[in-house]
Image (cartoon, rainbow, N blue to C red):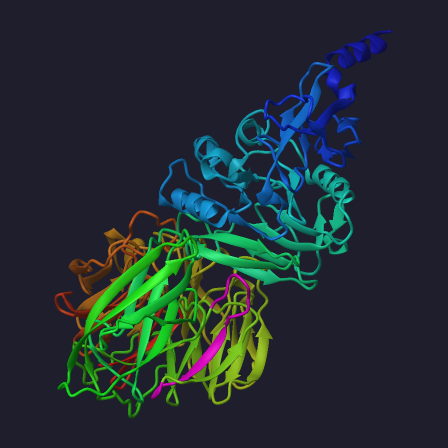
Amino acid sequence: MKLIYNVFIFLFLIPVYLFADFKGQVFLDSNGNGLFDKGDKALSGIMVSDGLNVTITKADGSFVLQGNAKARFISITRPSGYKINKSYIPIQEQYDVSYNFAMQACDISKNKSFSFIHITDTESSVGGKWVSNLRDYARNEKSAFIMHTGDICYDEGLKFHSDSINTSTMGTSVHYGIGNHDLLKGRYGEESFEKLFGPAWYSFDVGDVHFVVTPMPSGDHAPSYNMDHVIDWLKNDLANIPKGKAIVLFNHDLLLNDSDLILRSKGNQIDLSEYNVKAWVYGHWHINHIKKHHNGLLSVCSSPPDKGGIDHSPSTFRVFRFNKQGVMSIENRYTYIDKLITCVYPNDREMASSKNEYLPISANAYNTTSAIVKMDYTLDQTSTKKWHKMSQNSEWNWTAKHKMSPTNTEYPQSMELKVRAQTASGKIIETKTAFNYSNQQIVVNNTSGEWLNLRGNAAHDSLPNNKATTNLQHAWITNIGAPIFMTSPIIADNKVFIASIDDAQLDKCGVYAIDALSGNLLWQYKTLNSIKNTIVYAKGKVFATDTQGRVYAIDAQNGSLVWIYQLAVAKLPAIIEGMVTDGELIFAGSGHGLCALKADDGTVLWTNTEWKQQEGTSSTMTLGDGVLLTGAHWGALYAHDAYTGKLLWKRSDLGLRFRDGSATYRDGRFYIASAKHLFVIASHSGDIEHMRLSEYEFNSASSPLLFENKWITGTSKNGILAFDQKSLSPIWKHHTLPALFYTVPYSKNNEQSVEVSPVINGSYVYSGASDGWLYVLDVDSGNVLWKTNLGAPIFSSVALCGRLLIVADFSGNVHAFMM
């Protein structure tokens, strides 16, 4: 009797709605009053869910759901061609509640050709220019929706995003997914998220595409759901999708293995290869990374739009487009750039000259909120002021060749170039430059010497002392058609080697050879993914590592593949560590994928087994006195015997776990800047011989330049600094302009970032910066002796060979200057 009584009390305490059917109606609300009135139209065939079960509305728009014990919302899959203020209704405890959804027509979501925006990991409770960038782009391009895949971050961040980045403020539908830092303390982890954004898993349709949002499995606090339950719902959801219909999945992380497309949990799974899944879109890692899986599915990770990524990925939002044929394309939009336009060549900093009677014209332009779609120029050599079309080479760069008319004027001749750009939204951006023109062509006769590693050699301590002047003069400019990130030029055999990234389509990533004398493109080898950091040269071959850990050995003469080796790296993060070579061995990889390979044939000499990968690491390895120095971001600094692989020592104290910048080796010591410290470390023991806590931050990818008594380095936010090598006290500071967009991790406040390693020639220091300027500084004072605006961020350290200086920028331009 007591047992029966207890069961009765238990059943009495359970809310009655757990045993009830959920009923309601979906209709087209013609007058927008939220009620089903005369003239409104019932909508049939609409998917409705309680978070587990999925049903379809009948001819009269009605539905009945049997309910489940974990249900907290009734939600609809918003169909193409409609909009609704909220596509979910919290479940009420009353038994007789009707869950009605009043929708209105929406042309944007009906179009088979449409675009949407992906953002992630904003982790912010304050606004900024990135918010207006997002809003203005969405309005200019008529984006169908904005998707935020989580790590909105804590109560303050959730509240800010709910108030400031919503359908009303953005002018288009805004959807949210839940990240690990959105699972907060409460009755259950997703409680705060649900109060502001509704269910943590749901679906909606736009055009001919079905979009599915799934939750992060775990986080700062335990959720009430488990992935067994979510996968059951996903099966029910996809069971109602016509076979062959395109599907895009959103989550905060990539939950798929490399070997298959099965989404697994402890007690459940679903094979996504049985569906037409176009993409798995995620964040979490704070990187721009894209990977093509075996059945054509793309996994796409985005860096935050408001700040630099953990692996120094640019501040970005992604734009996905579907055309009428259902083909998907992706574009990166770099934030914070407002109507940027620059005359790269000719300009007022140097003498311009023609080549075979044609004056080359190069200009860079970029605008975050609306893409540049047209550029033209006029030259004041004639009185007609005719505007001439320019051809687009990359997202940033446009060029033309202007036939120069013979004149009786003595040279040099003063001239003016005007360039204008038009955005997709119709806005015009203009600039002009005065320059001096000479009919004497600059000729590069030879490039004596080689530049085979970052800053010339494996120790990164090359100190050339070639004849040079303070005023540089362009010899040639070649655009490779894709962005160049932290790959620095390599020079050998009268060739310049460089590599590109393509974090959007994977079509334009590769390694390139350019004739050092003429600037002509000699060959291009297309890689399977982006090359983001240092490439090297040895044994007549160019070596590069892509973001999926493939090491390519490419014949330097003809661009053919000699061998390829897949490093044993984890699926994430992307591999961006820079390589190093001693001329015989190639050192590449991270964690258990770190290894030494013979340059001749790719034979593995040794593989690391002592430590694992961490976050994406922007530093380049350094080699000195038989010691290989490398690291794992957020992990440690590691020193290995270069020829046996034995781990000699590791350090993670005093900020050395942050592996942004590279080390320089000299005389038995590694010189390295990390976090807020400068270190001098004994190469074989790992003992810190000298250290200084600085007021400055060293989270950029720069490595120290050691010259006489000076230590010169780029910084996260304070431009270029020089320190005394003995006391490590500051000597001088060179302020750059703020970065055009942000790459240093978590930077977003007008930081004067320098991600390159300064190079010296004689008494001149050469360095690019994230502001797009190339600087020549006096080594003793830091004073600017010469500078020129290249019109795109410079993340690539310069290379020197004879009197030739080579520098590459993010527009894809490779510049050769005569010193």
* Rendered location of residue 294, percent (x, y): 69, 64
Asked if 90 appears above or below 812 in the picture, the reply is above
Asked if 725 appears above or below 41 in the picture, the reply is below
Q: Is residue 502 magenta?
A: yes
Main secondary structure of the magenta stretch: loop
In which quarter of the view is residue 711 placed? Answer: bottom left
* Rendered location of residue 444, percent (x, y): 28, 89
- Residue occupying the point 21% across, 60% down: 721
- Residue occupying the point 30% across, 57% down: 753
Q: Is residue 426 left or right of residue 294?
A: left
In which quarter of the view is residue 393 placed? Answer: bottom left
Q: Is residue 1 left or right of residue 576?
A: right
- Residue occupying the point 66% across, 27% down: 101
Asked if 564 appears above or below 573 in the picture, the reply is below
Asked if 81 appears above or below 438 in the picture, the reply is above
* Rendered location of residue 539, percent (x, y): 47, 88
Which stretch is magenta?
501-518
Quadrant for the C terminus, please. Answer: bottom left
* Rendered location of residue 450, percent (x, y): 34, 85
